[in-house]
Amino acid sequence: MKLEVNNLNFSYGMKKVLNISDVSFESGNIYGIVGKNGAGKTTFFKSLTNIIVNYSGNVFIDGENVKQNPTILTSVGIVLDDMELYKHQSGLFNLQFFGGLRGNFDEQKALELAKELELADDINKKVSSYSLGMNKKLILLISIMNDAQILILDEPFRGLDAKSVEWFKDYLLELKKQGKMIFISSHIQEDIQSLSDRVLVLENGDFAGNFDLNKEDLNYIYQVEVNKVDEFIELLKTKEISGSKNKNMVKFSANEETYKELFNQAVASGIEFYQIKKMSEFTQMWGD
């Protein structure tokens, strides 16, 4: 299964939220979508699923335009951080209702998953009596119970206890093995890093960065304190690497192999290293 986005534009009044030219996604991958608050992550998810339809551009699933043929969305499950349930109805009613909307509702499977999530004993109680964690478990259960081919999860672990988070992460990794396409947004770095194959950074309405976490030659951000800053900057230039300096500190980006070569050449030319800091470019998105 393939999902493609072409020239997706959306604004709230005069404020442009999305301005995505072209991006595509393939089955069998987990995609982390990250960005600052207000970057447009939830709006992007809503546009993929026709919750928002007054956008310009196109969203295709296996060549079918979702706006023109919304029935293709029966293959999509979505969890939004602000998703509302029928609070004065039971958990089971909500499972039956939302499962029925998408068709192919397997109540036995839903109840088995509820048991694994330790929600079965409360499934016949009104949702208004649920704790925040129980409410979130029910929402997650609704998203996975119909065997969706595409899962879209907006802050799925907020409010969950650690045991439930680990259960759900294992479940998502198993779904990936089955060939599902999964999107996840989270403000928790470990959630994204432990699950994602690729991470896309949404900034100013478009995807400004793209990290393949499966690559072995990922670049890292190095900050080194040396005794001969200008000489080290010149050495970086021989590798076509741009470095910035602040007093005796030099900051630059390189993969591990290139850094080792730089280090050996620097030491051989009399440059001394007093301090070395290293972080992945991905990690830097969460701040220094």
Image (spheres, grey):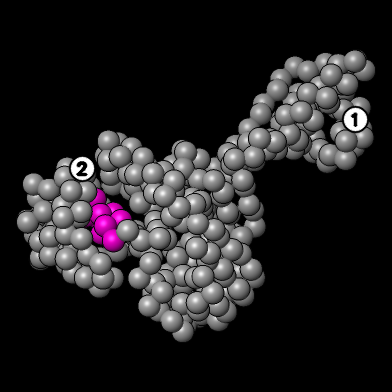
From the image, tell me which residue sits under label 1.
Answer: 235
Q: Which is more foreground, mark 1 or mark 2? A: 2
Which circle's residue, 1 or 2, is located before the other in the chain?
2
Near mark 2 (Cα within 10 A), the count class, few <14, some 14-19 or many ≥20, is few
Residue 80 appears anywhere in the view? no
- Element class at badge 2: helix
Residue 33 appears anywhere in the view? yes
Q: Magenta span has 49?
A: no
Looking at the rendering, the stretch of residues picked out in magenta corresponds to: 137-146
Residue at screen point 44% across, 46% down = 177
- In the rendered image of this protein, does residue 179 appear above or below residue 74? above
Residue at screen point 46% across, 56% down = 181
Nearer-the-camera pick, 252 or 91: 91
CA–CA distance between discs 1 and 2? 57 Å
Q: Quadrant of residue 243?
A: top right
The reply, left or right, for residue 173 in relation to residue 88 is: right
The amino acid type found where label 2 is placed reads Glu
- In the rendered image of this protein, does residue 55 appear above or below residue 129? below
* Residue 175, x across and y down, in percent: 39, 49
- In the rendered image of this protein, does residue 180 appear above or below residue 7? above
* Residue 274, x across and y down, in percent: 75, 17
From the image, tell me which residue sits under label 2.
Answer: 116
**Position of the C terminus by quadrant:** top right
- Element class at badge 1: helix
* Residue 285, x across and y down, in percent: 58, 45
